[in-house]
Amino acid sequence: MVTHAEALTGLLSSWLPKQRWFGDKQSEIDDVRVVSAALWFSDAAARLEHVVVGVASGGRVERYQLLVGLRAELPERLEHARIGDVEPGLTAYDAAHDHELTGVIRDLIAADADREGVRFRHEPDVVIDTDLASRPISAEQSNTSVVFGGEYIMKLFRKLDRGVSPDLELHRALRGVGSAHIADLYGAIEGELQDAPVTYGLLQKFFANTADGWAMATASVRDLINEPETPLEELGSDFSTEACRLGQAVAAVHADLVSALGTEVVAVDRLDSVVAGMNARLDAVLRRVSGLAPFEPGIRRVFAEVASHGEPVIVQRIHGDLHLGQVLRTLTNWVLIDFEGEPARPLPERVAKMSPLRDVAGMLRSFDYAAHHLLVGHVEADEIAPIVDARVVEWADRNRAAFIEGYAKDGVMLADPEANPVLLRALELDKAVYEVAYEYDNRPSWVDIPLRSIARLATT
């Protein structure tokens, strides 16, 4: 029985907005309510309480998962995780930073345990090593991950959706067909929230000694800016070979998803509804970002071509938020991670079947971002700026082409990007419109990156 929920809610209004994973820092919190609370572990030194809170802000209510540790004496190593005192002599803190208590969660998964309606399960034929020390990963924003030795990574979802997480669903499906380009699923934490299923966390294979695609790509861009006279193919950090291999990996995962979950066909007479969805998303951003208005006619023209080009579209389950930060280069191949889909989309949209070209479009947009983000706020001499700008455009074009070449290379893809230019361009524009809204809310100085791409895509 959790006895400190009421005291805890009084501390959260000021603590939550300071957390990297809190989703609406722009709006003032109107109310915090405990939705559910359970005791997961207790001994003489510490308690681990699992708390789900409903946070009302900006006219809507979001649900967040908290792992609350309680100690009479908070060690110095946990001071940064302090939430506050729930009573004299008893301090609450974020237990995701406590290696002792996160180890308890791993052990519960290993034991196939149940705690007050929460199910901790390992996957069939998986044996969990319970002797590995844990450490949190500080780089993540929307979720919190904990690494155990060099073997496992446990992702704890912070913002909760009512429904099975697509990250869990798709990893289970891909594991079932032996996909070679994912982090293998070892276990999960699941339960029910307000009469609907909910996913609290995953345990997966951890890849040590890896680099994510964003870090590799931006290192390549930095080198070409520093060596403006060197041809791209002669740069030691030329990324195009890896971009091609990445395209092959994405195509293989798409093929695996088809094997596991099948396909559907969107008939020509249903494409109007697809275009209506694109236009609705555009309408929402236009109401907020005036800088998008000059491109509205061109964007709508490209969207309209999808419905008028007269061919049905094959759809399947996809990654849904694919970009260079969602891929890891291991010693042997590329791995796709984080199959949650775009966080701003509601869950029914994120689990819907879509054209695999939506993932391709996301990656093409990411190459544009990698090429141009280093120039944000950077003032060059007038005679140098055009040279640098031309170089980064050349880099983006080279790597976009290499990725598409790799995607089509093994002949396993469901949709050929080069054979579907109308749909691919519309999907790129749809993604860029989404990016405009994201940058406007989070990084206003970056909003010109998607706007420049929209100018190109909407007028070509």
Image (spheres, rainbow, N blue to C red):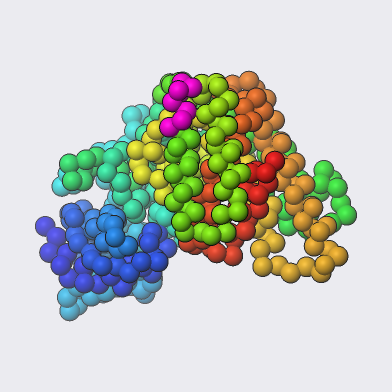
Residue 192 seen in the figure? yes
Residue drawn at x 64%, y 31% is 421
Between 139 and 394, the one lying in front of the other is: 394
Residue drawn at x 75%, y 41% is 398
Magenta region:
266-273
Q: Is residue 109 left or right of residue 306?
A: left
Q: Is residue 216 left or right of residue 112?
A: right
Between 173 and 14, the one lying in front of the other is: 14
The quarter of the image holding the N terminus is bottom left
Q: Is residue 410 left or right of residue 114?
A: right
Looking at this rendering, what residue extends furthest in the right direction?
229
Q: Residue 271, how many percent across, how many down? A: 47, 28
Q: Is residue 101 left or right of residue 177?
A: left
The quarter of the image holding the C terminus is top right
Between 323 and 65, the one lying in front of the other is: 323
Is residue 409 part of the magenta span, yes or no? no
Q: Residue 443, how many percent across, how many down? A: 54, 63
